[in-house]
Every structure is written in C-alpha cells, then in structure tokens.
Image: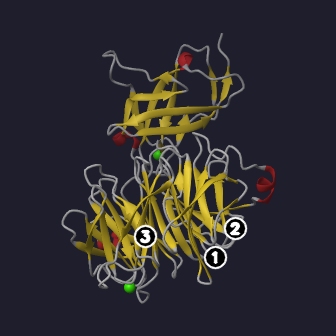
Amino acid sequence: MRHLVFGLVMALLLSSSSALASQSSTMAFVTDSASNALLPINLTSVQPSVPISVGAAPFGVAVLPDGSRVYVSNRGFSTRLNSTVSVIAVADGSVKTTITVGRMPMGVAADSQGRYVYVANNLSHSLTVIATATDTVFTTVPLNNPDGTGSFSPRGVAVNPNPGMPYVYVTNRSSDDLAIVNTTDWSVERVGGIGTDPYGVAVAKDGKTVYVALEGDGKLALVDAVSHQVAKIDVGPAGLNSGPTGVAVGRDGKVYVTNTESANLWVVDPANVDPAKRSVPVYVGGKPVGVSVSPDGSHVYVANSTGASLFVLSTASNQVSTISLPGSNPIAFGIFVLGPTAIAVAIDIKPGSNQKTINLGSHGVTPVAILSTSTFSAPALVNPATVTLAGAPVQLKGDGVTAVIEERDVNGDGFVDLVVHVQTDAMVVPQGETTVVLEGKTWTGDDIRGEGTVRIVPGR
Ligand SMILES: [Ca+2]
Ligand SMILES: [Ca+2]
C-alpha cells in the first residue's frame, strides 16, 4: 500500500478562505472536533483553505446539492454540551448563521433538492428539520414517547433520494432501531431489533435499500426500504464484532463502511453473490470515522479521527494515499465531499506514440484512447459517438451516425480500451494551453470526463 503525504503548511499559509470552491474542483468539508473548526480542502489541487471556526466539537456535516452552504452539527463535549448547527456560506467561508437545535446534535443530512436539512439530536431524542430557504427550524420531530417507547439516542441520519419515497432514516443507539420519518406528515415508523448500536446510515441511489453501520456487531444492516426486512453483511474482522461507524454509497452501488476499531475501510458489493467478495477490508490505519465518495466515483475519502488526515482510496486502483489536515480530530460524519458528477476517465492521446504533438492546422484525425479499469470497461460503457476532445467531434462512418472505433489494450494492462478519432482541425485549444479535456456520455446517460496533456502546434 502506498502512502503519499502532502505537506500542506505552505499551501495553508498562502491560500485564503475566499473562493473555496469552483465548478471543476472536488471539495471536502471536514469537521475537526479538536479545533472547533470546519476544514475546507480542495481535493483537486490538494490545498486546504483557512479553517472556519464553528461551535464546540463539530461532528456531523452536510453540503447542499448546489454547493452553496455547509451545515455542521456542534455536538459539544460532556462538560460543555452544545445544541447548535453552524451554517457556512461556501463562497466566502463565512458563518452565515447559527441555528439552535436539540441537545447534542450528531448526524446531519440534506435532501436531494436542498430544501430541508435534517439533524439527529442525541440527547433530545428528536429530529430537527431546517428549512434552507430561511435557515430556520421548520419543525422538530420527537422520536421517543413520554411513556418510554419509541427511539432513543439518535446518531445518524440519511434522506431517501428516490422522489417517490419521501423518507428520512435515523439510527438510534439506545433503542437499537431505525426510525423512518415520513416527510409528508412527519409520522414515524420503526424497524426494531436492527442490531447493536446502529450508527452511520446511507441509502442506495434507487432508494430501495437502507444501509446501517452496526457499531456493536461488526456488521452492516441492509434494510429493504419497502418490506423493512433486514439482512446483514460482515464488516468487522473475525473476533472483533464491533467498530463500524460511517457508511457511504458509491457511484457504482458499492457501499463503503469505516471500522473505527480495526482501522479498516470495508468495501461492500451488495450485488456480489460470492460471500468472499461481498465485503472486503482495505486497511487504512488510524481511527477512520466519516466516509464520503466523490460524485465522479473516482475516490473514497475517509476522515482519520486520530491522525490529522484524510485517507483516499482510488476506486480504480484500490490504492490508499493520505492527505494531511491542519486539524487533529477529523470526524466528518456525513456526506462531506462535493464535486463534478461526470465519471472520471483516464485517456491516452495518440496512444503508442511518444510524440504528443497536435497540429491544429492538420486536416487529419487524432486518435485518443479512453482507458478501461477493473470497474470501468470503456468499450462496453461509453457511447463513442458522444465523445469530444477539446470540443472536436469524433470521426463517423459513411452512415453519419456510427463512430469509427478500435477496441484494443493500448497500455498493456489487460483491460481492452476504446479508441476514437477526433477531427483535429475542429479542436479548440486556447493559446498556451497544454491540457485538453475529453467529454462524452455512457450508454446509460452518465457524463464522462478525462484530461490529457499535449503540445499544441497552432493552426492557421
Ligand atoms: Ca444499543
Ligand atoms: Ca488498457
């Protein structure tokens, strides 16, 4: 395993808190419980910005889908309890407002339209609903009842992304259940006996399965969102039936679970029928808590609560690297990464040639390979007619609709790649630019994006 540690002190000194995010950057927003700060990090340039002071012991985090604001739950310490959520404006890194919620707020989640933000209040046994239009409390849903029934000690919260399933899910540590809040009438249903000490929760992209990390069992619960039936998958090594805390769903449907006690990130493939391949641990180190997948699916980010760092798993190579953070107790419990949604692909312009020169005055075509990986087969997935390189379309056959392609392994890694040919004189490359961008779509309509470096000879 390869650990790359980037020194960030200089970058920290040189960068300012303004212009935290740009359209093309992937950003992380990490709560640091020790320094009472939110740490913004540009993951594209691997640069942190100035830490943003929030409340005591910030824990949970949620980013609005449009990237405009970040919501941080200030959990507080046992001696100094807190009951607030800090709202940070991403554009300038300022704290826009501080909202009073229930006692000891932990999990925070935004819905997919960005209309409401939900906060799980551990000591108040309630769910605060924040209306983002005004950044005020819209309602508070009690999860327990005066007669001692109901849900107790909520920790994690997640929103079903399926528009036909208006549910918010809350994990409850003391009552060992999953509370299901119906957002049309704020009624509460429960799935009891889910396992010991449910913690993090995430929902599959189609909304049909709810994933719950069971801290006391070393397992991941898979709750059917319709029938409420529960299945379980091991995410704790033999003999250590504890430790799962954070859970996140990847672009490809895989589920990532942090096991804080055993220093592992478990990669769960719920669709795999082979039990040995359904859940596999990747050793990361430290005490991993928060986990989030970049929207392009290329990397999984894990907050190391003891190491002042983020672990980064490349989903293509399965390699783990490390990014240093200015904090010392990063938690980042929630979906804390925001970025472009296009699937990141590696490309090879003029494959097989060491001469990456493109003469824009040439009337010929430039071959470009979209490289495949173990999880991304370019020939199977990419619609070649949709591909452009620096804005230039691909060469088509005589029928005017079918792209001219080759399917071959251009880099000898055993994965067959897709080669298309773009019309060289149609490429638009600004003077002095050496990076060109490939864009396109998969057959299922997802965007793809890759970058390559070339030497450009300007055309006439
Ligand atoms: Ca319990
Ligand atoms: Ca290949």
Mark 3 Cβ inside 8 Å of ligand 1: no
For the question of whether residue 299 can be seen, the reply is no
Marks 2 and 1 sit apart, C-alpha to C-alpha, by 10 Å
Q: Label 3: few (<14), some or many (≥20) within 10 Å? A: many
Residue marked by disc 3: 156
Element assignment for label 1: loop
Q: Nearer the viewer, residue 242 or 102?
A: 102
> Where's residue 447, x and y in %?
43, 38
Disc 3 and disc 1 in contact, CB within 8 angstroms: no
Disc ID at residue 327: 2
The crowding category of the residue bearing disc 2, from other C-alpha atoms within 10 Å (few below 14, some 14 to 19, many at least 20), is: many
Q: Amino acid at mark 2?
A: Gly
User: What residue type is disc 1 on?
Assistant: Thr
Q: Quadrant of the C terminus?
A: top right
Q: CA distance from mark 3 to mark 2?
A: 23 Å
Say what amino acid the circle numbered 3 marks: Gly
Instruction: Indicate which disc residue 81 carries.
Output: none
Front tag of 2 and 1: 2
Q: Which residue is mark 1?
A: 306
Q: Is residue 202 above or below residue 25?
A: below
* Outermost residue toward the top in this view: 460
Point out the tag, 3 or 1, that comes first from the N-terminus: 3
